[in-house]
Each structure stands twice: as C-alpha cells, then as structure tokens.
Image (tube, rainbow, N blue to C red):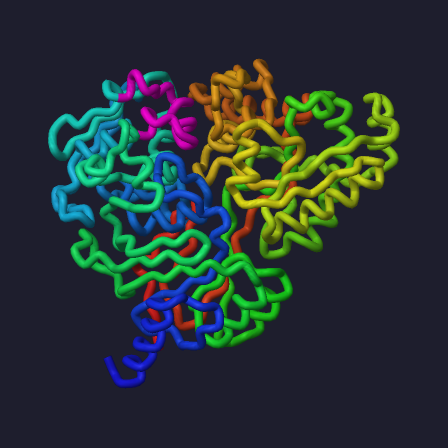
C-alpha cells in the first residue's frame, strides 16, 4: 500500500471505528466498499424471518446458498454450495451433491446436516419466510422426512406435493429463507427451544465471503472479508453500510468520494449525478411491484363498489411520470413484466366522476375517513401523498400514518390496517406462480392460518376460483394451456377487483463512483459484493 492509500485507509478506519458520522470527510480507501442506504426496514438478520430487500442484500454476503441465479438472467442456475443436482424422473425428488471444502466463519465444516437443519428450521419456527415452503406442501411435521442429509455431502428434497421442481430450484436460488446456517454455532445460543432465533436476530453464522463484525440498528453494518472463503477471497477487506436517509447527504458524500455507492436517492439528485463524470447509475428492474393495498377485513373495503371506486382514484400516470422515474415503470397487473403470460396494461386512470358515482352506489356518497400506512421514505411517502390528494377529490379523508418497516408491514401482517402503500411480489423467479403466490393466492383466509408472507392473506382477499386455477396451472405441462390459465387468473383478479392495486414495476437505481467495478445488482436483491473492485 502506497503512502497516499495508507493515509486514506487510516482516515476512514478512524471514522468507521468511531461514530461513522455523516460529516466524516475521507476518501474511501481502496480496499473498503462504503455504501450509503436507508436501514429503516432492516429489523432482523435471521434468515427465517428477514424478508426485506435491505436485509437480503446484507445476508447475501454473509451466507451461501445451494445454488445461485444469474443477476440479469434469473432462469440461469449456477452451482454454489451444491456442485450438481438431479431431478427424479417423476419430478418428486431433487438430490444435491455438495462441495466438501466449505467452512463456516466459525471454522466448522459445512455439511449436508447444516443444509437440512437450516431448511427444517424455517418450517419449525413458522415465521414469515415459512409461507413459501408451505405452498409446496412442507410443514413443521413433515419437513424432517422431506428434507434429509443422506450423508455428509448429499441432500435430498422430496416434494410433499406435486409441483414444478424447477420452481423449487428458483426458490432455493433466490429466497432469503434458503441461506445455509452453521447449525453447531447457532445451537450454542439456543434459548427455550428457539433454534437460535433471538441470537440470529442480531448475529450471523454463515459461510459467505464476508463475516459480520458489527450491526447497530439504524446506524451501520460492518462486514469483514472471510479469508478462508471457498471461492477466491474478495479484494475488498471490508464492507461498510451506513444508515443514511437524506438524499442530499448521499449525493454530497458520493460526489466527495466519502461513499462509493448510494441507494434510495431522490429523482433530482439521481438526475444531477448522472451528469457527473465521476459517478455512474445502474438501473435494475426487480420482480416486485409498488402498490396500494386495502384490507378486506375492513367493512368499507370489503365492498366491491368501494374497491372499484378506488381503482379510479389513483393517478397512475401522474405518479409514474412525476414520482417513479428511476424507481419504477407503470404496471397494473399482478404478474410482473416480461413473462409470456403477462397481459397488456389495463389502462386505468384517474376518473373522479366515475369514482364518486361508484361510492354513491356503495352507500358512501359523501366519502369516508380512513388511513394510509406507509414507510417514511422515498418513493413510498410521495405515492401516499398523491393517493391522499386524489382520494380527497371524492370526499375520502385519508390520514397518512408513517412508520418503520416493522410498524407498516407489521400492521399488514397482523391484518390490522385500512389502506397501505407498499411494495411486494414474487422476486425474480421467472415463473407466473411466483408473483401470484405472493400477491393473490390465499388458500386459507382464517386468522389462525397466519399466512403472513402472502399478501393475499394479509389483505383478506379470498377467491376459491382463483386459488383453484393457480393450483392447477402449476401442474399443467402443456405450456400454452398453462399460459392461458395464468391469463385467466389476471382477468378474474381484475373482474373480482382484488385488494391490491399495482402501480409500478420496481426499478432499483443505484449510484456508484465510476472507479467501482464489477458491481452487478441482482434482480432478487441478492447482490453479492465478493467480486467488487476499485480501479484507482
């Protein structure tokens, strides 16, 4: 390291080890990657319960998966901990052969027992991320039989119900529930049979390219390079993630070189930085959608006429033209863009006169009072403000309630909300079932079912007819017939007026210093930083 770099290294090391103050003014050192981002929704690191995009980005660098999906072409599956895998002829069983040279950060060897235990743990804890596996028929009672270590380096997954095994592979390569955990290390910290849940909320036990040094909520995440990683160790010795919510602060620090990557910036700041030769923008379309949701457990919104009225009280075009550039593109279907089964846009727009007539038919000629829950960050809060304004034109008085991810989505998971502006969907799995499972499917609408990772259940939308088509389509082997069935679901969802009104397909725009190389944002938010370098 030359003198110049040494000085830079020392400057940032002092800043990091002290308070990571926003006013710190030090060019980032060559061997550390500093990221500015909001951590409002970073609530837990436990892979069994942590579903937010922010935590997925953290855990993707602390943990490994059996397989990985290509960042820009998610239908391409690559080996990771699993060297190879085979699917039985009847499609009921997937067998993985694992690498034998992988160690966890603790020094423990990663074995098939850890893989089976990690997946079994998700079902046994029955937290948010168990829902995905439940749709494949896995339960806390059958998971020990269904997912087994056949020897130290062979894992066998027997599907409890008929499904498309490729969809299961996509889930294993993208779901935050599929990270492999060091069972021996975690069980040292088990309290009252919690399978280490309390400890893993703020700690990590992975085998990824970086190991957790420190996490302080709404402050910072520090990850140090794991020198014994089974792949080539990263050139970055440390990843520093800093909690920053002010767009102008992010812009200033990126311009000065105080940070290398900025996420969650406002449109004016993004557009200004695009003109800076020292900065580049990377736009990455994601599988998730921005939406307005209502709770059908609320009597007002269980009324179909009211939901129909709301459909005409959202200024889709205005929101996408003025709020969503760099954040999303107009989309009104529950299936993400780019799939063969996705139908054309519906063309709904703001029509206050029609909405008022529908409200009068529903028994609300003078409107009503309600509330909109929303994260207090861009672009969510601006979408909510727009919706509040257009609702008011029809006499609906909507109070905006801002909060953290836990407060906003926590209320949704408990089905204790009225309206909500949020973001969700099926991630990147290139299969219609992924989006429909996340946003529409709801096999059991009882409170006791607690299908908290299904936004269909969260909103109380329940359509046995749609559920049946979704279940049959998954098993349909005729591709054209399957596409038509998924199109039927979209038409029915429109006719029945679901509880979720999609507004935009998510676009994630990240700003990077131009000397940061080999950063490749992942459509599933599993962005891995192991190959990032700086060329100075």
Tell me where residue 69 sits by quadrant: top left
96 is higher (above) or lower (below) than 257: above
Residue appearing at x 60%, y 29% in the figure? 416
Residue 495 appears in view: no
Q: Nearer the viewer, residue 530 or 142?
A: 142
Q: In the visual, does 156 lie left or right of 504?
A: left
Magenta span of residues: 121-143
Residue 326 appears in view: yes
Tell me where residue 455 sits by quadrant: top right
Residue appearing at x 32%, y 24% in the figure? 124
Q: Is residue 129 highlighted in magenta? A: yes
Residue appearing at x 16%, y 31% in the figure? 154
Q: In the visual, does 29 lie left or right of 86?
A: right
Position in image of residue 258 (x %, y %): 44, 72
250 is higher (above) or lower (below) than 256: above
Q: Is residue 482 highlighted in magenta? A: no
Position in image of residue 316 (x %, y %): 71, 44
Q: Nearer the viewer, residue 202 or 481?
A: 202
Position in image of residue 208 (x %, y %): 26, 50
């Amino acid at each position: 390291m030359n003198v110049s770099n040494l000085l830079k290294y020392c400057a940032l090391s002092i800043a990091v080890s002290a308070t990571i103050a926003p006013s710190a003014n030090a060019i980032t050192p060559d061997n550390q990657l500093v990221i500015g981002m909001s951590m409002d929704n970073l609530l837990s690191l436990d892979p069994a319960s942590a579903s937010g995009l922010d935590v997925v980005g953290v855990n993707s660098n602390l943990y490994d998966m059996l397989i990985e999906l290509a960042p820009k072409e998610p239908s391409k599956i690559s080996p990771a901990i699993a060297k190879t895998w085979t699917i039985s002829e009847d499609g009921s069983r997937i067998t993985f052969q694992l690498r034998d040279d992988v160690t966890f950060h603790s020094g423990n060897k990663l074995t098939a027992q850890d893989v089976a235990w990690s997946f079994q743990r998700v079902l046994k804890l029955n937290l948010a991320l168990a829902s995905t596996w439940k749709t494949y028929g896995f339960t806390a009672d059958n998971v020990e039989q269904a997912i087994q270590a056949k020897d130290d380096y062979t894992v066998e997954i027997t599907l409890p119900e008929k499904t498309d095994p490729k969809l299961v592979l996509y889930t294993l390569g993208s779901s935050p529930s599929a990270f492999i955990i060091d069972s021996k290390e975690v069980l040292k910290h088990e309290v009252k049979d919690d399978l280490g849940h309390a400890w893993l909320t703020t700690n990590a036990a992975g085998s990824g390219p970086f190991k957790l040094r420190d996490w302080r909520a709404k402050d910072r995440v520090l990850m140090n390079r794991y020198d014994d990683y089974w792949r080539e160790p990263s050139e970055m010795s440390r990843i520093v993630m800093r909690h920053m919510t002010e767009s102008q602060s992010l812009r200033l620090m990126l311009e000065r070189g105080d940070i290398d990557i900025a996420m969650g910036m406002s449109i004016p700041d993004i557009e200004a930085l695009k003109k800076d030769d020292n900065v580049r923008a990377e736009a990455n379309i994601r599988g998730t959608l921005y939406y307005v949701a209502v709770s059908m457990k609320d009597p007002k919104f269980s009324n179909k006429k009211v939901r129909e009225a709301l459909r005409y009280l959202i200024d889709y075009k205005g929101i996408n033209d003025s709020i969503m550039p760099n954040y999303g593109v107009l989309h009104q279907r529950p299936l993400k863009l780019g799939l063969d089964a996705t139908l054309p846009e519906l063309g709904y727009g703001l029509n206050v006169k029609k909405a008022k007539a529908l409200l009068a038919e529903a028994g609300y000629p003078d409107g009503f009072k309600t509330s909109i829950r929303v994260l207090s960050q861009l672009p969510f809060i601006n979408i909510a403000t727009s919706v509040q304004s257009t609702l008011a034109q029809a006499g609906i008085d909507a109070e905006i309630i801002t909060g953290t991810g836990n407060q906003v989505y926590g209320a949704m998971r408990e089905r204790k909300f009225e309206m909500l502006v949020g973001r969700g969907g099926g991630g990147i799995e290139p299969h219609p079932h992924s989006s429909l499972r996340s946003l529409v499917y709801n096999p059991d609408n009882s409170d006791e079912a607690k299908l908290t990772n299904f936004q269909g259940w969260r909103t109380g939308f329940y359509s046995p007819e749609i559920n049946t088509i979704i279940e049959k389509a998954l098993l349909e082997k005729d591709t054209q017939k399957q596409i038509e069935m998924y199109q039927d679901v979209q038409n029915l969802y429109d006719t029945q007026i679901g509880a979720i009104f999609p507004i935009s397909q998510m676009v994630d725009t990240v700003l990077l210093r131009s000397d940061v190389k080999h950063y490749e944002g992942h459509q599933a938010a599993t962005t891995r930083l192991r190959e990032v370098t700086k060329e100075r």
